[in-house]
Amino acid sequence: MQRAVDLLGVLLVPSPDPASVAQVLREHGEPDVSLSAEDVSELRAAALELREVFAAPDVASAASVLNALFAKYAGPPRLTDHEEGYGWHLHVDAADDGPWGAWLVTSSALGLAALLADRQDVPGGLCASPSCGKPFAHTGGGSPRKFCSPRCATRERVAAHRARS
Ligand SMILES: [Zn+2]
């Protein structure tokens, strides 16, 4: 799930840098990839579709966004152990060598759907900091989060304090 969130973080900017996108993929165990400009714009289009899951105001809307993404991109579920170190896991993308965009949507949607079913609530949100707005996943329990990171939470707390005094 963190892979999807990290990828959306580098893709949801006006012109994503192919090198940073490839670096995030490497950090999450994907083999060394060289991404063309088309690959990156395809990934960015996928990231924009996935952003709607994080923007959904309630669990029912998040579920219907995810269902629409499955209807558009997913193939029949299949178990695979082709990736080193992951063991058997479920894939719903149409092909192992399919386009990057469909891979990002289906792998992220599957993780988000599992999280939604597990929590019986929205699987994530968008950072409440007006200067950030990045998606984050509701993993790890604890109280519901509003911010993507401790850094954003601190910055907004300081700003709110300054505004009051
Ligand atoms: Zn943030």
Image: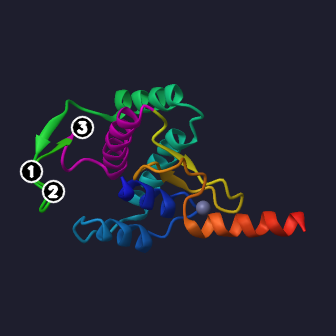
Magenta stretch encompasses residue 101: yes
Residue occupying the point 25% across, 47% down: 98
Local crowd size for mark 1, using a 10 Å CA cut-off: few (<14), some (14–19), many (≥20): few
Q: Nearer the viewer, residue 89 or 20?
A: 89
Residue 126 position in % (x across, y down): 58, 50
Which label belongs to residue 92?
Answer: 3
Tell me where residue 157 appears, x and y as whole percent: 72, 65
Mark nearer the N terminus (1 vs 2)? 1
- Magenta: main secondary structure: helix
Q: Position of residue 152 (x, y in %)?
A: 63, 65
Q: Residue furthest right?
A: 165
Amino acid type at mark 1 = Asp
The local crowd at label 3, few if under 14, some if 14 to 19, many if 20 or more residues have their Cα within 10 Å, is many
* Residue position for label 1: 81
Is 11 located above or below residue 109 in the figure? below
SS of the residue under disc 1: loop
- Which residue appears at 60% of the width and 34% of the height? 57
Mark 3 vs ligand 1: CB below 8 Å = no
Marks 2 and 3, how far apart at CA: 16 Å
In screen coordinates, is 82 left or right of 130? left
Q: Nearer the viewer, mark 1 or mark 2?
A: 2
Figure quarter occupied by ligand 1: bottom right
Determine the secondary structure under disc 2: loop
Q: Residues within 10 Å of mark 2 (few under 14, many from 20)?
A: few
| Residue identifier under label 2 | 86
Part of the protein shown in magenta: 91-120
Dots 1, 2 in contact, CB < 8 A: yes
Q: Residue at x 54, y 57 (%)?
A: 12
Q: Is residue 164 magenta?
A: no
